[in-house]
Image (cartoon, helix red, strand yellow):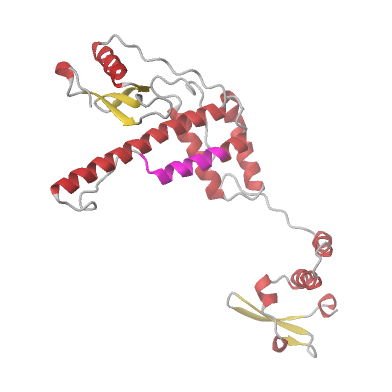
Amino acid sequence: TLKMGERGASWRCIPLRGPARDDPSSWYWTCRRRTETVWSDWLSEAEAQERFGATVRGTYEPKRAPEVPCLADLLNAWLDQQQTRVQEREIWTERREERDAAAGRSATASVGRRPGLARGSLRRYEQACVRLAAMLGGDTQLAAVPPALRRAAVERMATGDAATTVSADLDTLAAAWAWGGEGERSFTRGLDIEIPFVGREIRRERTTPTREQVLQVAEQLRVPWMRDVVRLQLEHGCRIEAIADLTTHRVDLPGKRLRLVARGHDRWVPMTEASRS
């Protein structure tokens, strides 16, 4: 940890991770004033010391991040920030374990609220960003994302994606969008986005196939008994487990009826001409 002058208590410059693979002398340094991050970059110790001094003296001007031209760039930049948070937690955990070992305490006795982000959460964010890029198009300009968001969410629901998955992906987009307009970042500044509520507002559009459509699908099955199962389900409107559990004592041929048992429900239903054949 580098400190400087009389203001060393409020200014800190610490290495988060490293060394870099292509340059062993470079580490990833971050400069903070109290809890605010001023800059982060891959630097050697001498370069970090020089930039830290210039920052404290007020002569260093942080470079403004370039505007993100498309959605994929915003998501990648946000994921890089989440990776930094993961490194912060891992370094904090390692140092806490060292202090606990030196003090003779157990590793779980002093665990409180940990800073940063868990690696499992980062993996979920990465998967959500992949789905968002496929959903909206990674090369989509940021200004075109808000008006296309609701339609894209409806299309995902229509293709069978679960509402909880779509909702979690939209929450991830909202977090990245808010991050893109904070501080020195001008990625999404001035671009308002409204996240649709998935559940009541957006519902998956369901269509009921006609009898002819079901029979057409059944004829495409190569196994004969599978075609018979589909026809029985169509004739009696029952679940697949009710058909699978049919035995000889559940078939009343003289009475022309079937005993269907599924999910605790036990009923006799009359056999149709199609099911008898």
Name the quadrant containing residue 228: bottom right
Q: Nearer the viewer, residue 266 or 247?
A: 247
| Residue 198 visible in the picture | no
> Considering only vertical position in the picture, is 197 above or below 53?
below
The structure residue drawn at horizontal position 40% and vertical position 24%, both measured from the top left corner, is 23
Residue 64 drawn at (x, y percent): 42, 16
Name the quadrant containing residue 63: top left
The C terminus, quarter of image: bottom right
User: In this rendering, would 22 be left or right of 254?
Assistant: left
Q: Nearer the viewer, residue 15 or 265?
A: 15
The structure residue drawn at horizontal position 23% and vertical position 27%, both measured from the top left corner, is 1
In terms of secondary structure, what is the magenta stretch mainly?
helix
Q: Residue furthest bottom?
A: 254
> Considering only vertical position in the picture, is 174 above or below 253?
above
Residue bounds of the magenta highlight: 117-130
The structure residue drawn at horizontal position 51% and vertical position 26%, both measured from the top left corner, is 192
> Considering only vertical position in the picture, is 24 above or below 221?
above
User: In this rendering, would 161 be left or right of 86?
Assistant: right
| Residue 92 visible in the picture | yes
Q: Nearer the viewer, residue 227 or 103?
A: 103
Residue 105 drawn at (x, y percent): 16, 51
Q: Report the label total.
A: 0
User: In this rendering, would 29 be left or right of 225?
Assistant: left
The structure residue drawn at horizontal position 23% and vertical position 46%, both measured from the top left corner, is 97
126 in the magenta segment: yes
Q: Nearer the viewer, residue 97 or 251?
A: 97
Residue 209 drawn at (x, y percent): 77, 58
Residue 99 drawn at (x, y percent): 18, 43
22 in the magenta segment: no
